[in-house]
Amino acid sequence: MNQKYKPLFDSFTFPNGISLKNRLVMAPMTNFSSNEDGTVSDAEVKYYARRSKGVSMVVTACTYVTRDGKGFKGEFGADTDEMIPSLRKLASTIKEQGAKAVLQIFHGGRECPPDLVPNGEIVSASDVPSERGNAQAPRALSGEEIESIISAFGETTRRAIEAGFNGVEIHGANGYLIQQFFSPHSNRRDDKWGGTVEKRMAFPLAIVDEVKRVTAQHAKEPFIVGYRFSPEEPETPGITMADTLQLIDALSAKDLDYLHVSVTDFWSKPRRGIEDDRSRMEIIHERVGTKVPVVGVGSLYSAEDVVKAFETGVPLLALGRELIIDPDWVEKVETGREDEIETKLDLGAQARLVVPDPLWQAIVNTPGWFPGVQ
């Protein structure tokens, strides 16, 4: 191995005592490839098996915690105990390759396609539609429904434990329901769940508390609980970097195992809320200090890209698109073959890369999403 990359292969231990064999994580990526009934498909199992060998931890695509939270066609479910055998198959596949398996748990809120949810009724913090084209206005959740969804995140955590996962990641990013409660764009409530920035945090923090409670009750060995968030929103009003710093202060006090920042580019800078020329990742990492480990991500393709990001002090780095382009990325760096890493998608290599057809079609029909796809 080139000594420059050796620090990427140092082990890492979470606050709860679980140890990772290196600093490289597979990022959660929707693959649109589950069965119609919400179970994990054979194609998905093969896709994860192909990518779980080198990294130390795999965060799965998101799974819905309630039936009305299904956000994508081909998303797998964890909303009932009948789904536990399906979840177990996924957890076992990842762990057999030597990686820790973390289930990302989620509710799509107003971003759910109406045709995927019961009665076509989408829900959110308030009845404010998303700004994406032709979005349907959601129905504002009642207080009782909010409590029920919080419980559902806990129940899905229990299922993850029973299925053999090593942890869960609470998906509070990318504009979905948890973020919708934190955002002043989507949350216009005037009860205990909205209004001030502190009240807009109430739902995310209640979910963290419930997931931690269930973990303490059901996990017989250390179990990872992480939280993913998007630091800013383009909407006005929307989440600013100043809001996010308040959120991560609160999250840092919750005894979480990690915070995972969702950005497209590791080096992207704040848009509004604070004056700082550093990247959001560096600002967030400095803010949390030693209180909770940070997972960084965002357009890291080459070994050089990754080691440069690691030099900021962020202890764990997630690879998303890059592990679709080159599933052997980690092994190549570890064996001194970083010059052989592919950083642009080979459009003739679907079978070799073991990418399920729905995901492949989404990639090749979305120019600019992946390097090599024009």
Image (cartoon, rainbow, N blue to C red):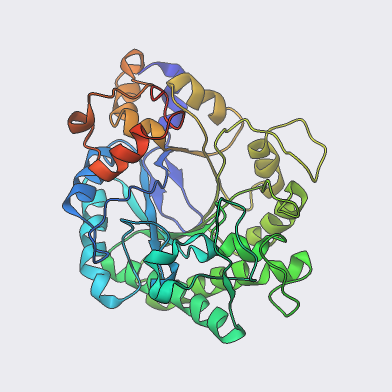
Residue most extreme to the top:
339
The residue lying at 26 percent from left, 70 percent from top is 83
Picture layout, residue 1 above or below residue 12: above
Q: Is residue 133 left or right of residue 44?
A: right
Q: Is residue 173 left or right of residue 326?
A: right
Q: Is residue 181 left or right of residue 271?
A: left
Residue most extreme to the front:
134
Image quadrant assignment for residue 319: top left
Q: Quadrant of the N terminus?
A: top left
Where does residue 298 sit, x and y in percent of width and height? 52, 35
Q: Quadrant of the C terminus?
A: top left
Picture layout, residue 338 above or below residue 24: above
Picture layout, residue 272 above or below residue 63: above
The residue lying at 33 percent from left, 58 percent from top is 75
Residue most extreme to the right:
275
Image quadrant assignment for residue 336: top left
Q: Is residue 157 visible?
A: yes
Where does residue 326 sit, x and y in percent of width and height? 31, 28
Counting labels gives 0
Q: Is residue 356 visible?
A: no
Where does residue 192 sit, x and y in percent of width and height? 72, 79
Picture layout, residue 373 above or below residue 96: above
The residue lying at 41 percent from left, 34 percent from top is 366
Where does residue 340 sit, x and y in percent of width and height? 31, 15
Image quadrant assignment for residue 197: bottom right
